[in-house]
Image: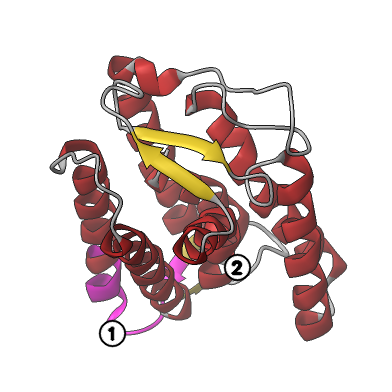
Amino acid sequence: MFIGHYAPAFVASGTRNGPPLGLGLFATQLIDVAFFSFAMVGIEHYRLTPQATATNWLDLYDMPYTHSLLGASCWGLALALVALAVWHNRAMAVMIAALVVSHWLLDLLVHRPDLTLAGGLPLLGLGLWNVPVLEKPIELAITFGSLAFYLGRTRPVARWARLVLVLLVAELLIFQAIDWFGARTTQLEIGQQELALFAYAAVIVTGALVGLSRQAKV
């Protein structure tokens, strides 16, 4: 699951009391942003193992602080408290916490058993990455279906609204294509983590611009 993680943000930002789109997108990917940042400095770890799953080679064997349900809940609470302090909107804060935890729940569908409840056994994961004929269309459907929902609930208010929307769609498709069809390697390189963080940042920033270019329909 990559761009599919953004689906809950599109839905939430298209509803009453929903967060700004950029913040919603950040919330849904906070867990992976933290994971790849931690991996860069050796706090959490992963390997690239041939055929780890049919979709990718990620062997995510050590990620208790980000990809445990407890860890995801703590990250969600922290971001929700920040949002509450800034926007003073409890409904939005609760929604943001839910968006952060949605990352773990969507990962539960696609990961092989490598997720945890609190950092130890049992290992959880339904393994849809091993059934790409199902996982790929599901990911595309929930991503662009939820984006269509957001667009249906908002209207453009800036001349550049269409431009940033096209850029966002292009980024989603390009980054997902790289994730699915990019060259495979077993070598861990810091550039891999930087590329992942760049992809997250690009989508979040462009999504924030999309949000600024649109407003809710009356």
Residue sitting at 79 percent across and 56 percent down? 74
Residue topped by disc 1: 159
The amino acid at mark 1 is Arg
Nearest the viewer among 209 and 162 is 209
Residue 135 on image: x %, y %: 37, 24
Residue 161, magenta (yes or no): yes
Name the one closer to the observer, 151 or 172.
172
Query: In the shown orientation, is residue 166 left or right of residue 216?
Result: left
Q: Quadrant of residue 160?
A: bottom left
60 to 26, vertically: above or below:
above
Residue 182 versus residue 204 in the image, above or below: above
Q: Is residue 207 above or below residue 145?
A: below
* Extent of the magenta region: 155-166
Residue at figure coordinates x 78%, y 38% from the top left: 118
Q: Measuring from the top left, give residue 104's x and y in whole percent.
A: 62, 40
Q: Position of residue 198 (x, y in %)?
A: 33, 69
> Could one spot residue 26 in this view of the protein?
yes
**Residue shown at 31% from the left, 76% from the top:** 161
Quadrant location of the C terminus? bottom right
Query: How far apart are labels 2 and 1 at the CA level?
Result: 20 Å
